[in-house]
Amino acid sequence: MARFIFITGGVVSSLGKGLASAALGSLLQARGYTVRLRKLDPYLNVDPGTMSPFEHGEVFVTDDGAETDLDLGHYERFTGVAARSTDSISSGRVYSNVLEKERRGDYLGKTIQVIPHVTNEIKDFIRIGEDEVDFMLCEIGGTVGDIEGLPFFEAIRQFAQEKPRGQCLFMHLTLLPYIKASGELKTKPTQHSVKELRSIGLAPDILVCRSEGPIPLKEREKLALFCNVRAESVIAAQDLKSIYEAPLAYHREGMDQAVLDAFGIAPAPKPNLARWEDVVDRIHNTDGEVRVAIVGKYTQLEDAYKSIAEALTHGGMANRVKVKIEWIDAEVFETEDAAPRLERLNAILVPGGFGERGTEGKIKAAQFAREKKIPYLGICLGMQMAVIEAARNMANMGDAASEEFSEGVDPRDFTPVVYHLKEWVQGNAKVTRAKDDDKGGTMRLGAYDAVLTKGSRVAEAYGDTNIEERHRHRYEVDIKFREQLEAQGLIFSGLSPDGRLPEIVEVKDHPWYIGVQFHPELKSKPFAPHPLFADFVRAAKEQSRLV
Ligand code: GLN
């Protein structure tokens, strides 16, 4: 039976609760335990699939096809444990389940209320798979005091009460602001935040305090006294140069020890931190720098491309180079020449995206990379744009386009090299979709196999010809243009096992030009960089020697 750790946040949002949870997960693994991490989000969307990347950052997709919060990406990157659809829940999902049950008559005769019906639904969710791991870490989104968070806080209070004593632990993450004028670190916001928690029946066992610098003993003692925790359980989470320093930094601060102590686990198993020591060594001991352009649409919010940025960092670690990302808004290439911004860069990446805005700029970037022989990685929409570019400029199909951007356009006026996919195979089952389906959760989502052509660049990068990668898209490159495009040098080097869906394209006679319909970035880890990103950065490193 798992032990449960509930992670909450206070004072302000964006303190890195997800990161702290993920790092703690990795430290428990280093002590030999198995872990699973979960995110409980108070917002009312059923899942983040329909939210704007500008507002919510990237959508992280699991193997089993759930569209989830980007924190699940942190969890995977730090623990290597593949997230499942049952590791992410929102108020929207909870209420939708409860209402579905109500309509079905499951509660017949009862008045449906937040307590117990909604809280029971949350508790049932937390319990899923509780026998599978040693520790279940559940992060509650938002901050204590948010109205919509209340049912979750109440549910975890009840949950801990129902479990045998000593099986649940509460970790609270807060901010200690530093007041420059008086040279003081202030504990009051944390005291208030804990007071707020206690008023709803939750008493933290461990306080993780974000601060710019170290926390002096005096402040720790004050926090311990006023917040009713042990002084050893006040963990300083100082700003770090790289997020991957977090496991070692938190270990030095005694976070994992405090957790084991709180559970009364003694003697504590010795940690093996070799994996994280190697990761940190690779970050700090680099030989040179490569500059990679991300030509996208949501470039003002880096969180929108979180996993891609991380996967590039991992690719750098594999090659012991620092990867510097240049964020470029694709729209600029619709009015400006691509050369001045792109020519001195060592590689170009066009990420996934939705909607027409910026796509002509992405096509220009793909063309520039192809013609100037700069390494190019196109992901999902980035692959589709590469195919449109090749069709227009290599295969003489000047009107090549995607059906995604041709609403209301006469079908005779363009060649749909990318079309709306309405039927495909998943495992042994056929999946079908209609144009006016609901938007939420209806894409081709989750893990699908692909078969790679022996001897292709992509097969070389993977060192394999059978792969499985995560998908999230509605449109697809049309296989019927294969011959025509291959004749001009755009090779379809990876297909779905039934041969009907192009998964990968690459340009012949180019140092490194690959487009993939899936999202390789979602599976990259600092201790296991994704082979495509490792090889892409290797190619960028070679390119950097030429510039
Ligand atoms: N908008 C494209 C599609 O739906 C690409 C999606 C993506 O890049 N994730 O097919």
Image (cartoon, rainbow, N blue to C red):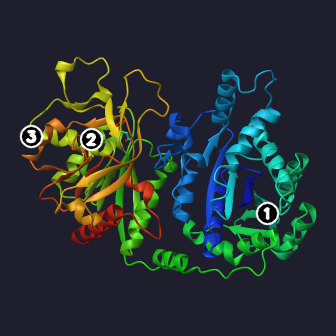
**Mark seen at residue 30:** none
Label 3 secondary element = helix
Q: CA distance from mark 2 to mark 3?
A: 17 Å
Taking the spot 74% from the left edge, 47% from the top edge, the residue there is 143
Label 1 secondary element = strand
Q: CA distance from mark 2 to mark 1?
A: 48 Å
Q: CA distance from mark 1 to mark 3?
A: 62 Å
Q: 10 Å neighbourhood of mark 3: few (<14), some, or many (≥20)?
A: some
Taking the spot 61% from the left edge, 71% from the top edge, the residue there is 29
Q: Which residue was labeled with disc 1? A: 207
In-image side of 118 versus 505 (left or right): right
Residue 443's spot in the image, x, y percent? Answer: 41, 35
Residue 72's spot in the image, x, y percent? Answer: 56, 53
**Mark seen at residue 484:** 3
Q: Nearer the viewer, residue 125 or 218?
A: 125
In-image side of 26 versus 293 (left or right): right
Task: Using the rendered image of the protein, determine whether residue 180 is visible from the camera's viewpoint.
Answer: no
Select label 2 or label 3 by which is in front: 3
Taking the spot 89% from the left edge, 49% from the top edge, the residue there is 201
> With respect to residue 71, does 220 lie above or below?
below
Q: Nearer the viewer, residue 499 or 273?
A: 499
Q: Which residue was labeled with disc 2? A: 385
Taking the spot 51% from the left edge, 62% from the top edge, the residue there is 77
In-image side of 540 versus 510 (left or right): right
